[in-house]
Image: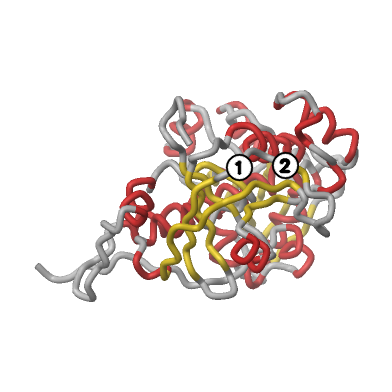
Amino acid sequence: MENTRENMIWGIHTQDDYLFLNKNVIAVGWKSMGDISKLGGTRESIKAHYENVYPDSSKQSVANCAGMLYRFAFEAKIGDYVVFPSKTNRMINIGVIESDYYYNEATTEYVQQRKVKWLKHLPRTVFSQGALYEVGSFLSFFSIRNYTDEFIAAINNEIRIETSDEEDETISATADEIVEATKDFILKELSKKFKGYDLEEFIADLLNAMGYRTKVSPHGGDRGIDITAYKDELPPRILVQVKSQDGDIKESTIQSLKGAMREGDYGLFVTLSNYTKNATKYLNNTPIIRGINGTELVDLILKYYELLDEKYQKEIPLKKVYIPVQSYKDE
């Protein structure tokens, strides 16, 4: 079981706990891919075959899935460790890979397999929140990099079980990572699904959720004004311009909004990106126009998400959950 490189630690997920724990294997699916060992042994060859087998997959999906298959079949080595969080008993199972990759066509789904010897079956409570978050990756097969020391300590019977009075220092970082990942997801979905007029309709619905009455301008524009909003039946009127472009918004673009405003109007500029330095300075010097960038827009979406139209909640699917945060005790 000698290895020319330091043994790596891999994480893996499955829907078949019984197969892993009772047959002493780790496995991934993609049965239609056939025997991966016959595809040339390169990431590029696996990717090309994946594109042929799953022609409707997005480029990102092809890259992700082909990458996982390549890592499972070729990058992972005999002697490497694997961490498997089982769902049926909520345990963290740690093993060592004992065989090269092989294709088991007799299996219903998880045909891409490797033999494993399970070394430890430990309750989740002995690991930090950060380690649990890392091993909870959305990927089926992935390398563990940030909390390798915890899993090695567990293998060597050196893991330290936290007492009830001790604070898990990874909780705050983990909560922050979840929040940031959620914000990244929302912004990516906005950029992918809402362009041009679609984004205008979405922003109008968000403003409605915030308590404004809105009217979306006919396509073709009302002198560059995309949405007109009122807080109540009386002025002031709020003129809204929405941009879904990738590049930062320039000062001249905001000046065009101001040119469309009448006395007593307020302006709102919404972009998925950000503002140039000069545009930011212009906004700071023009208090009747508020600029919202992509990050601020995501914060508003999270705040008013439950009040958005159902069709937009389906486009940006989120689930409300509670996550642990660091407690701060009086010193």
Q: Nearer the viewer, residue 3 or 193?
A: 3
Q: Nearer the viewer, residue 131 or 126?
A: 126
Would you name the residue on which mark 1 appears? 99
Vertical comparison of 187 with 55: above or below: below
Percent of width and height locating residue 36: 77, 35
Quadrant of residue 142 within the rendered picture = top right
The residue furthest left is 331
Secondary element under disc 2, as helix, strand or loop, is: strand
**Amino acid type assigned to the residue bearing label 1 in the image:** Ser
Q: Residue at x 59, y 32 (%)?
A: 75
Q: Pointer 2: what residue?
A: 102
The CA distance from mark 1 to mark 2 is 8 Å
Relative image position of residue 199 (x, y in whole percent): 74, 48
Q: Residue at x 34, y 57 (%)?
A: 154
- Going 55% across and 59% down the picture, which residue do you hit? 300
Amino acid tagged 2: Tyr
